[in-house]
């Protein structure tokens, strides 16, 4: 990677466009990042409103177990040499999303217990599978921390397909998801099939996590799902405004993160998440600074009037 300038100013944006036009891997990286930058905050906002944002971490660690299982198959069985570990990772994640909803039904008064149960199980199984197939630590690292600059054309197709499916499901069931996110009991009385919609949404979350792993990695995937939402909630008041603003922040994070990673030779996934953190700090700090300035100005005017 090149080193030199940094930031997201006009000069950096111009060079970033030149890189996109010049390098195929940058084109694929940007497409993958922008797609994930749309679907991650879309599901993230519903998770945050439901106070279930940690489900992203739980399903991500289950996905690690699936990836480890796929890598183990590659190592132990010649017939699986060309097997894509992301397939087994997705299968594990989708299965775990169904179990999350089942556990929430078992513990109706303590539904948050479903998250640590799935999280612990995912980590434990992942550690066992990794230790059972010693020797593919480099491959595992790529899934743990992301490798957006190494996204293949076939993976781009899968990410775009997942993005289209996620957006379609959320738009089609937007009213049901909105109602269940704010008041499940009232939604049930209104005739909304709570269990079916929750299972469907869990499958969508699992799909988003699986698609996002190549961009930011298993350890950082929850950051791209929740951080843009957290920043947007500092500014927007309505649900739709928060949704659109969180998508905007995610897109800025991806674009600036890729540019900074290219210039500074940093890990792209970690850089994207750090940009998201920076946006959150700037938005939150700026909002509080403006409030202080306005309060001090009002205080001065009151003293002058008296």
Image (cartoon, helix red, strand yellow):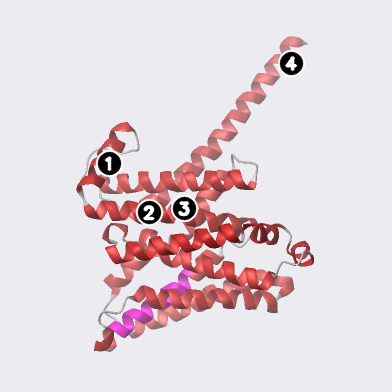
Q: Which residue is identified by label 2?
A: 33
Q: Is 135 located above or below residue 286 in the figure?
A: below
Q: Which residues are magenta?
A: 60-74
Q: Residues within 10 Å of mark 4 (few under 14, many from 20)?
A: few
Q: Earlier in the sequence, mark 1 or mark 2?
A: 1
The disc label shown at residue 302, or none: 4
Q: Residues within 10 Å of mark 2 (few under 14, many from 20)?
A: many
222 left or right of 183 in image: left
Q: Nearer the viewer, residue 112 or 15?
A: 15
- The image shows a total of numbered marks equal to 4
- Residue 233 shows up from this direction: no
Q: Are marks 2 and 3 in contact (CB under 8 Å)?
A: no
Give the distance between the C-alpha atoms of the residues marked 4 and 1, in whole angstroms: 52 Å
Q: Are marks 2 and 4 in contact (CB under 8 Å)?
A: no
Instruction: Look at the magenta stretch and give its main secondary structure.
Output: helix
At 32% from the left edge and 75% from the top edge, which residue is drawn? 84
Q: Residues within 10 Å of mark 1 (few under 14, many from 20)?
A: some
Which structural element holds mark 4? helix
Q: Earlier in the sequence, mark 4 or mark 1?
A: 1
Q: Is 178 located above or below residue 103 in the figure?
A: above
Give the distance between the C-alpha atoms of the residues marked 3 and 4, in whole angstroms: 46 Å
The disc label shown at residue 17, or none: 1
Whether 69 is among the magenta residues is yes
Q: Are marks 3 and 4 in contact (CB under 8 Å)?
A: no
Which structural element holds mark 2? helix
């Amino acid at each position: 990677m090149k080193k030199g300038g940094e930031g997201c100013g006009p000069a950096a944006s111009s060079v970033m466009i030149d890189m996109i036009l010049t390098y195929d891997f940058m084109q694929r990286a940007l497409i993958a990042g922008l797609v994930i930058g749309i679907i991650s905050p879309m599901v993230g906002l519903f998770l945050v409103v439901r106070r279930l944002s940690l489900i992203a971490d739980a399903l991500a660690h289950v996905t690690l177990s699936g990836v480890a299982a796929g890598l183990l198959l590659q190592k132990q069985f010649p017939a699986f040499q060309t097997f894509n570990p992301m397939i087994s990772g997705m299968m594990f994640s989708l299965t775990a999303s169904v179990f999350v909803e089942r556990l929430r039904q078992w513990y109706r008064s303590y539904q948050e217990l479903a998250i640590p149960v799935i999280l612990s199980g995912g980590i434990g199984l992942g550690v066992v599978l990794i230790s059972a197939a010693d020797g593919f630590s480099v491959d595992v690292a790529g899934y743990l921390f992301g490798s957006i600059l190494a996204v293949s054309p076939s993976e781009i197709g899968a990410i775009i397909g997942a993005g289209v499916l996620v957006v379609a499901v959320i738009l089609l069931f937007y009213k049901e998801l909105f109602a269940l996110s704010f008041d499940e009991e009232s939604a049930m009385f209104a005739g909304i099939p709570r269990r079916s919609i929750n299972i469907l949404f869990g499958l969508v979350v699992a799909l988003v996590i699986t698609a996002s792993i190549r961009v930011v990695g298993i350890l950082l995937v929850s950051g791209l799902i929740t951080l843009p939402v957290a920043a947007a909630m500092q500014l927007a008041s309505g649900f739709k405004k928060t949704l659109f603003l969180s998508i905007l922040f995610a897109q800025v994070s991806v674009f600036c993160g890729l540019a900074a990673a290219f210039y500074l030779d940093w890990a792209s996934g970690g850089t994207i998440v750090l940009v998201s953190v920076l946006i959150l700090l700037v938005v939150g700090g700026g909002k509080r600074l403006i409030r202080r300035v306005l309060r001090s100005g009002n205080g001065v005017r009151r003293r002058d009037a008296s």
